[in-house]
Amino acid sequence: MSDFFFSSSSYPTSATINMDTLHKQSFAVTELATRSVTLFPTKAQIIRDIKDISLKPGLNEITVVGITPTADEHSIKVEGSGSAIITDIVVELLPNRDIFQEVYPESDSDHDSSSESEEEDEEKVNEELENVRSQIVNLNDELARAKEITTSAERRLAIIDNYGDSLALKKEEVNIGSGVETYRTEREKIFRDHMEAHLRERDLVKQMTKIKIEERRLQRLEDKEQAKIEKQKAKAERAKAKIREKERRRKAEREKEKARIKKERENFWPRRCYTVRITLDAASFTPSSSRRSSIASIADVKLHSDKEESPVDGYTCDLSLSYVTSSAFWNPTYDLALNTQTNTAILCFDAQLTNMTSETWTNSRVVLSTSEASFSGLQDDAPTLVPWLVKLGGRGHGSDIDGAIRSREERAQKETWVTTQNAMNQQKPRANLFGLSESSADFVKPALAGGLKRYASRKFKIPNPDLEHSLYQGLHQVGQVRNHTMQQIQPTSIDQGQMMQLRQLQIAQQIRAQQAQQAQQAQGIQVYSQAQAQTQAQREMAEVCQESYSPGSRELRASVVPLASVSMAHRKAPQDEDEGASSDSDDGAPTVLEANPELSFQESCVGEEGLTTNYELPNLKTLKPSSTASKQRVARISFSNVLFSRTAVPKYKPAVYLKARIRNTSKLTLLKGSTGLTLDGTFLGRSTLPRCSAGDAFKISLGIDPGIKVIYPKPDVRRSTTGVFTKGENSVYTRYITLANTRAAAGKAVDITVLDQIPVSEDEKLRVDVGYPRGLLTGSAVPTGMPGKDGVDNKDWGRAVAQLKKGGEVSFEVSLNAGRSVKLVLEYELVSPNGEKVVEC
């Protein structure tokens, strides 16, 4: 077997290929295994493997399609092993031939599975009411029959009456007796039928009246029952309506989620992809001396020692494809928990992994590297100093530039350096590379803005402050820059150079805004009692930031989103003179990497190669393209002998600021990054952890210590006139500073540095003398202090010394016992000529 490699930076100028015998194979990058992903602070290197490629005798063309368009085409390199020789490599940026709807088909499983059965309840029959109504019907029938009998009887009586009248009218001789008897008999039978029918009718009317009353009673009960049933039906209908509305909202949310996922996929759907065509010569074995013309061949072909293959049987080879992309990177994030009781700290070192390419790296080895080496621009040589020639320009020389500060060549070289660095690090606009249509906008979620800020701060460096000031004078906010440029320049008229300058302008202005904000954050964090309010404010800020991105933008925006920090507008900690300096006095027990914490966090393996530190994450990881960074645990470090210092400048702010000094005795280099701060179990907020190498120390502000109360009243002033021959005015000013340690239960003293000052005279006629503490001279320390309260218990308050420094600064080093208070006195006298006023220079 033979090893070979080929880099796209050394393409052959020509290659003669017989297309009739060219055997082609195509591989999608999604089908290739990912061997490793090495993430750098600004980019990433990916290595993919193509195993067991079957080659046929002759020329074979292996095509790899679908490489992310954010890759650096000049970094694409091919290596491999097998019985073949690489003769040609071609890298092209071609349109994406995949169809979005086929790769991500619409789901048909969202039909309403909870179709409600709207079966109407069968109406219940009131049998008692129905019986009553049936009786009413029967009574009506009986009443009609009785009425019919009555009517029949009345008609028969009428007939009988007519019969009696007809007897008198007959002319022939009639038997009156028999006729009357017949009349009487018949009328009696008819009357009897009539009377029975009448009685029957009257009885039926009485029964009908009673049954009607019963019907009305039952109807009222039925109406009440029906009303109750209707009320229950209405209630059930309202419940069903709520269920339908809830299902409708759920369906709407599912649709919104589907739209979000689709939008997310569109934002990482490449319009164009890199295609790599590799031509391999798998011809019959030939001595290496006869193939000297193969310029792509690096290693000679070696035969198998145990088995010789026949040329007709075909060959196999393995290829590895490596390339660099600038749309994947990592940045550190920390969580620092400090304990003032044990003077210890625990630092959780995490890594935020970002993949904004079009590729998914499945089951790959992930390595985090601290290297920030540039992969381009290596052709530049170290500059050569040009002689700096100066002369006197005369009094009337009109130039304002001091020729003794910067030479003309220096200014030109720095301008060239800035332009070259920004042009070298310029990325292709994502709007031209991703999306389904030309109008698809770029998508950068504000949750990723913190990583992009660090990414931009590393990639765009402006070493010349004068040049930076001249470029951005008058534009103090990123929004002003964007609005100003977009109003003045139409996108259709911007050429590539103008677009590059515009993007550089935005990035650099964001860096300035970030630095200004971090300078405020470094001054301190809010007091402990306000921690919960701070956390709520941070959440509200994050919610506002999540709605702040505009999907209509066509440019990659690294929006300046403030770090989740507390407001320090009204509290600013004094800068320490020896900020970040190392001291040998806090060397304690060595800091060690702890074992796995209680939860299932696995730490990375750390390795160093020269100036680079690599962190290999445990197990294989899958990194999908996403606008949200994922977090992985790198290490968990314990620190001991943490030094807590307290500083107060009551002249400006009546508060004591707490600061921690931690020595990094581990073997890890802590990179600059955002950190969450927890003090004695209380979350304070987020701040910035400075870069700290192994063995160095760093300081971090912890805000205001609420356990120390500071009282700084107005000064007492006493004025007098002295002198016999020369009149003068003496003014004695007395300052009182009261400190109270309210932590009576803590049981240990706290050390506080209190800073105050006396005025410094710039006039020989004005003299400033220190009256108290007595004997206070520049450079010497004298004891001072008195109990802050009356009483025997407060006499043992501690100790304090005062020292006068340059510039009139007076430093009080106080050791204050728990539950005690101390009063510091600073008295100075100003002696000035009579009638003269003291003014500030």
Image (cartoon, helix red, strand yellow):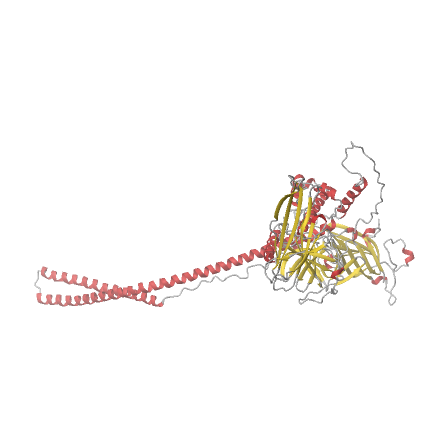
- Quarter of the image with the C terminus is top right
Q: Please provide percent x and percent y for residue 475.
A: 67, 42
Q: Please provide percent x and percent y for residue 169.
A: 10, 59
- Looking at this view, name the residue that lies furthest to the front: 724
Which of the pair 31/826 is nearer the observer?
Answer: 826
Q: Is residue 281 left or right of residue 438?
A: right
In the rendered view, tell whether residue 187 sits above or below residue 723.
below
Can I make out residue 556 in this image?
no
Which of the pair 390/420 is nearer the observer?
Answer: 390
Q: Please provide percent x and percent y for residue 752.
A: 67, 57
Label total for image: 0
Q: Is residue 481 left or right of residue 184?
A: right
Which of the pair 399/840 is nearer the observer?
Answer: 840
- Quarter of the image with the N terminus is bottom right
Q: Please provide percent x and percent y for residue 524.
A: 66, 54
Q: Quadrant of residue 143?
A: bottom left
Can I make out residue 642 in this image?
yes
- Looking at this view, name the residue that lies furthest to the left: 173
Q: Quadrant of residue 831?
A: top right
- Looking at this view, name the residue that lies furthest to the right: 289
Q: Quadrant of residue 141?
A: bottom left
Which of the pair 536/445 is nearer the observer?
Answer: 536
